[in-house]
Image (tube, rainbow, N blue to C red):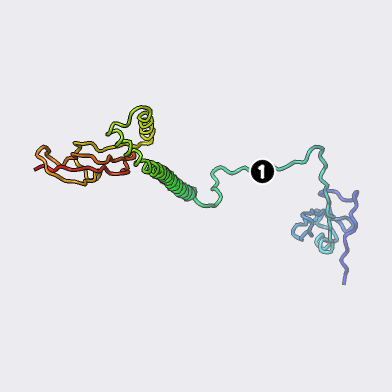
Amino acid sequence: MTEKPRAADPVESGSTPGGSATAEEQPRVVIRDNRKISKSEVPAAADAGADTPAEGLVEDAEIVVDEIEVEAASVDGPPVVDAPAQPVEGAAPPAGPPLGAELEALRAELDERTRDLQRVTAEYANYRKRVDRDRSLVQEQATGSVLAALLPILDDLDRAREHGDLVGPFGTVAEQLITALGKFGLSAFGEQGDPFDPTRHEAVAHQRSADVTEPTCVQVMRRGYQLGERLLRPAMVAVADPE
């Protein structure tokens, strides 16, 4: 068996682009992507009368291209920082709850808080009114209790006035007392000739008279008193009914 000749080491001076390839010369080989060259990529020998075909040389030849490491050239200056990606016009917004649903939820929560505030405000206003009313009632009751205890003294003053004893310094003191009690809202009622009012008068005697057209107080035995609109004591009277 005849041994196929191997390709010799490439010689810089012996290889001419486009020349004929012999057994002693290296055929022109194109290296692509650091891989072996197939038979179909080897060009035909320029010289048709060469003793050794180029095909045999390529089958046994193995060309290896060393990896080349390229170091990035250092650049003076601050490091380059990539700018953040800008949103693309017309791109769809990120997935999430619809804006309308979130707005409706906020409105519902606002309405609920508004109703709570209105309810608390109304309750506080009612509480203040109730407290003021109770305070006024307590004050009126306390004042009424004190004035009711002084009513017998006022009755004695009325009897002294009827007898003509309410004169001089004693009369002056009596008038000052009545004036001071009037400042607290105490007022007397029950005069002869007043129409009879069962809610304010206490009838202790009845008689008939042709001089009246309706039940009338013809005699006041004890005057009545009231504190503002509150009745402290009814007047004790004698009533005359029409005939």
Placement of 214 over or under 59, stated as above or below: above
Which residue is rendered at x = 36% and y = 43% of the image? 148
- The image quadrant of residue 50 is bottom right
Which residue is rendered at x = 75% and y = 57% of the image? 41
Q: Residue furthest bottom?
A: 1
The quarter of the picture where the C terminus appears is top left
**Residue 100 visible:** no
* Image position, residue 124 (x, y; %): 44, 45
* Image position, residue 166 (x, y; %): 32, 31
Q: How many marks?
A: 1
Q: Amino acid at mark 1?
A: Pro
Left or right of 199: which side holds 209?
left
* Image position, residue 199 (x, y; %): 24, 45
Left or right of 95: which side holds 219?
left
The quarter of the picture where the N terminus appears is bottom right
- Depth check: 171 or 40 in front? 171
**Residue 90 visible:** yes
Residue position for label 1: 84
